[in-house]
Image (cartoon, rainbow, N blue to C red):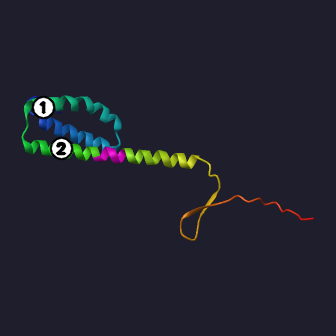
Amino acid sequence: MGLFNAMRPVSALIELLEKEHDAIIKGQFSVLVDVSEPKESLMQALSRVSPNEADLNVLKKLSERNRKLLVASAHGLKSARKRLADLKAPLPSFQTYGPSGSRADMVNKSLTIKKKI
């Protein structure tokens, strides 16, 4: 794989960002932990090489793509957690839709008959 090729930290970092992208898409979040240390080392090596602007633009584009995917993944996980919590929580009352199309709670009314004497 050649991640630590000192002559080509740009290409090694591009390769690592592609690996990170694949892991995010496949939901293999343990791979993200594995690539974090090599990614940090490559970033440090990159600062010593002074890459050209085109290479920096490619790295920026790939990093931004991965960042957006991670944000979307976090949002999806948060939504799934909330939905599971909602499903586990008992409903306080029966819910239906009102005439305006919005949710409305049906208040529990007593079913006993009161007699007037």
Depth check: 67 or 100 in front? Answer: 100
Q: Which mark is residue 47?
A: 1
Which residue type carries mark 2?
Lys
Location of residue 93 (image quadrant): bottom right
Q: Residue at x 57, y 46 (%)?
A: 88
Label pair 2/1, CB-CB below 8 angstroms: no
Q: Which mark is residue 75?
A: none
Residue 111 versus residue 29 in the image, above or below: below
Magenta region? 68-73
Label 1 crowd bin: few (<14), some (14–19), many (20+), radius 10 Å: few
Residue 111, percent from left and from top? 78, 60
Residue at far bottom of view:
99
72 is within the stretch colored magenta: yes
Instruction: State the residue at coordinates (53%, 45%).
Output: 85
In percent of width and height, residue 50 lies at: 7, 34
Residue 74, relative to residue 96: is it above or below?
Answer: above
Question: Which residue in the structure is indicated by mark 2?
Answer: 60
